[in-house]
Amino acid sequence: MLVELVVKNLGVIEEARIPLGPGLTALTGETGAGKTMVVEALNLLLGGRPDPERVRVGATEATVEGLFAQGDTEWVLRRILPASGRSRAYINGELATAAALSELGAGLLELHGQHAQQALLQPRTQRAALDEFAGIDRTSLLSARRQVDQARTRLEEMGGDERSRVREIDLLRFQLEEIDRVAPVVGEEVQLDQEEDLLSGALAHQQAAFSAVASLSDDGSATDLVARAMNKLADRAPFVSVLARLRDVAAELEDCAAELRGLGESIEPDEERLDQVRSRRQLLVELRRKYGDSLSAVVDYAAEARGRLEELTAHDATLAAYEAELATAVAELQLVCKGIGKKRRAAAAGLAVAVEAHLGDLALAGARIEVRVTDTEELPGAGEQVELRIAVNTGSAMGSLSKVASGGELSRVMLAIRLVLSNGPPTMVFDEVDAGIGGEAALCVGRALAELGAQSQVIVVTHLPQVAAFADEQVLVSKTQGDQLARTTAVVLNEEDRVVELSRMLSGSPDSSTARDHAYELLSSAQGERRLGTQ
């Protein structure tokens, strides 16, 4: 339900904070006081088209906020309408699109007023009404349709026409032959780099090794010098520890000389092997240039290409399997469509009769309703196109709701539908529902709204005291004229103030004792009816 509505700088409303309770709430006030702006504010929260001219004169932007609660979950919807520039939408403080606001708001609040605001004019609303009346769950239809779409997508991904498929097969085979011919091994580039370095400098490496051996072991070499030092320190007690270390050095130098001699002898220039290594490295560079930044990426590409080639070469068998899968999915969809279409067509007349039964009490006694069910090309047989048509007067031709019914008549038709159906959004707003009616018809509309308010939150904008008297709460929207600009306020009325406001609505003279007596009687009678209705 809508817990609170805050409106700032919208039209004549400088700032209004309207707390709302469950059941039926009536918004009343003089013509031009700003009740329409409250409805406009709710329309903005539903993602409605913004009109910068609605921003209050002198303000840079208008703001509308609504706090909705459903169980333990709360949403704060916010719309900012600047005097110039694009509007902004927020959901729980996070920036959102108007479309996201509309999608969320559609499940929270339903607005019935001007033609542009009427949810009843939307084909999905009319179809949903028939589906609820017929007890239809569209889950199976959506699931079957999704299966068909997925099967078609798989077929489309099979590789296009035959020529394109053959060209792709040839290309993949060429690429795989090129990669397989080289047979790259992840990590081999490091080994090849080391081997090329060794072979390209073989003579220099060999010369360096033998030169180092000479420096370590020839006369006057490091080994010879260390031996001389050891002889000078022999049998001298102060140098025992140093002498031991020099023996270790001498042994290490001999080992190094022996190892260098062996390495130098093992290195042999091999121009043929060097050419092979360089050729191999160039082949790997070419593969990386074509198929990946690294050999690992090249190997991965080869695996993917091999899998794709298997798919394409097995095209005929796969295609047949996918076509069979699509045929099965289409057949299932057709079966589901046929079943849902049959239910919709069977229930259409019953829904029309049930709605018509309420129209007489809602000042549409001569109106007739027709629920037309037709197929769409996309879902043949399902009766997906549902249209509610109406003849407002006896003997008149049926026509679409948007062309035949006024705003008030549309609201009353929607009220009748909501009385027939139990599943609706948590909050419903009716504007103009009492347009062009009065007397007993107004009392009937008030009773119907109160009945609906017993199961949902209902907000009605009304000029009729007979309707307002049935409300659980009454909010007075009033306008005062300041020095420069008018200012609108919204106040929840207590019992005594409701009598005063109903007196004004009855006679235009809230101070009249006769009007007050009548207002009190009207309020007592309406509330008494409500109490009896709940017993």
Image (tube, rainbow, N blue to C red):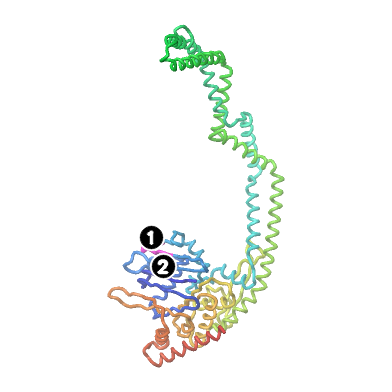
- Comparing 67 with 41, the one in front is 67
- Comparing 509 with 349, the one in front is 509
Question: Which x, y percent locates residue 14?
Answer: 35, 71
- Comparing 326 with 88, the one in front is 88
Picture mark count: 2
User: Which amino acid lies under the numbered mark 2 shown in the image of this protein?
Assistant: Val
Mark 1, secondary structure of its residue: loop
Q: CA distance from mark 2 to mark 1?
A: 17 Å
Image height of 479 relative to 84, above or below = below
Side of 451 where 30 appears, left or right: left
Q: Mark 2 and 1 residues: CB-CB less than 8 Å, in contact?
A: no
Question: Which x, y percent locates residue 49?
Answer: 45, 65
Question: Which x, y percent locates residue 267?
Answer: 55, 15
| Residue 79 among magenta residues | yes
Please tell me how crowded label 2 is: few (under 14), some (14-19), or many (20+) other residues with Cα within 10 Å. many
Side of 493 where 299 appears, left or right: right
Residue at the limit of the structure toward the left, as seen here:
483
Q: Is residue 432 visible?
A: no
Which of the marked residues, 2 or 1, is nearer the chain's N terminus? 2
Q: What residue is shown with label 2?
A: 64
* Image quarter of the C terminus: bottom right
Query: Looking at the rendered structure, which numbered label has been put on residue 352?
Result: none
Residue at the limit of the structure toward the bottom, as seen here:
514
User: Which amino acid lies under the numbered mark 1 shown in the image of this protein?
Assistant: Gly
Side of 40 where 281 appears, left or right: right
Residue bounds of the magenta highlight: 78-87
Image height of 266 relative to 101, above or below = above
Question: Which x, y percent locates residue 395?
Answer: 59, 82
Query: Looking at the rendered structure, which numbered label has been put on residue 85?
Result: 1
| Residue 264 among magenta residues | no
Q: Is residue 327 visible?
A: yes
